[in-house]
Amino acid sequence: MIRRTFHRLTLALGAAALVVLLLVPGATASGGAAGAVYALTNSPAGNAVVAYQRGADGSLTPAGSFPTGGMGMAGLSSQGAVIVSDDHQLLFAVNAGSNSISSFRIRPGGLDLADTAASDGTMPISVAFFRGLLYVLNAGVPNNISGFTVDRDGGLMPLAGSARALSAASTNPAQVGFNDDGTVVIVTERATNRIDTYTVGTGGLLTGPLVHPSAGPTPFGFAVDKRNTLLVSEAGAGGGASSYRIGAGGSLTDISPNVMTGQSAACWAVVTKNGRYGYVANAGTGNISGFAISQDGSASLLDLSGVTAMTGGNPTDIAISHDSIYLYTRVAALGAIAIFRIGSDGSLESLPSLTGTPAGLAGLTGY
């Protein structure tokens, strides 16, 4: 009797698990979840988002190209040119050649263009999103950032009075982003070696900038962890990154200034969801540097050589899957997206790359 009851319970649990797998989009028997990786064609003749379906094993499969309704600009160099919302429902992209931004709804079959709007500046290169509030970084002179409210369907509404200048009219900025709780907006300036912060106030309007000297040369890409540790890549001589603690009112406190890797052109940065590891893509030396990040925000090299993984070519932009299992980086010279599995110790295991990607891609994001 007990055996029969146990057998029935096992069958019932198995059936329930199957129902869950059928009802949860992208769920698989192996425990993985559907995901995607996106880049921009950045074509001056007509920009588009290129989509790749992500398998449970981290592999990528081409899944179509979706016009943005705007134009790209050759030579776009930034982080955050295309981003995905934290709930994986919306995607945002810049159109640097037509001074506009685009929003998409993410669907099981691809992307649906939701809206395209003027960026309230020239040459938009980076966007940041937090709970219905979007800011775009315009790199044309004079540099500025400008805000939009976003409805649940991706509709873009310019936020009146939201435009804010950077520390100077021409700073060669690289990225805009929010801190973990959406109370601070951050911008890196390469030409001035500065990091700007703005506090988010009522209705999404910003106060600032509060201007901070960068701890290392040429601050470029950055990522923020759940403890509001800011990891900034530094593209200047010697390569490396610095970590900061983001405080109230947009204050920045140096934690680990200028941790040098000895690599070249450290331009793009990501951190794992748990905040334990950070990675920087080094375009000049064809590799990735990994960092261990402590609870106090201090950062140290995972490998004394400064090389955690080789990519070959020139890795340009970097992204992590939402579960922090896989890391991706575009390798333009090889026409590839390199794929790595992130180990529990932060190590990177090289997996088969996706090859044959279009020339001229810009940006990289995923979930």
Image (spheres, rainbow, N blue to C red):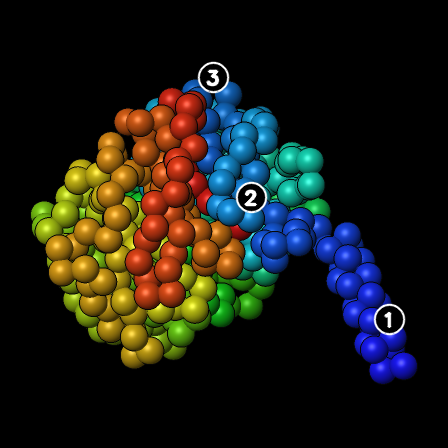
Question: Could you tell me residue 155's position as x and y percent?
Answer: 66, 44
Give x and y (percent) for residue 161: 51, 53
Q: Name the residue at 31% across, 38% down.
A: 316
Quarter of the figure with the N terminus: bottom right
Q: Residue furthest right?
A: 1
- Which kind of residue does numbered mark 2 sit on? Gly
| Mark 3 lies on residue | 45
13 lies left or right of 154: right
Q: Residue furthest bottom?
A: 2
Of residues 227 and 250, the one nearer the viewer is 227
Left or right: residue 326 compared with residue 209: right
Reading the image, the residue beneath label 2 is 55
Residue at screen point 59% across, 35% down = 116
Q: 139 or 238, which lies in front? A: 238
**Rendered view: 282 above or below 68:** below
Tag 1: amino acid: Arg
* Mark 2: secondary structure: loop
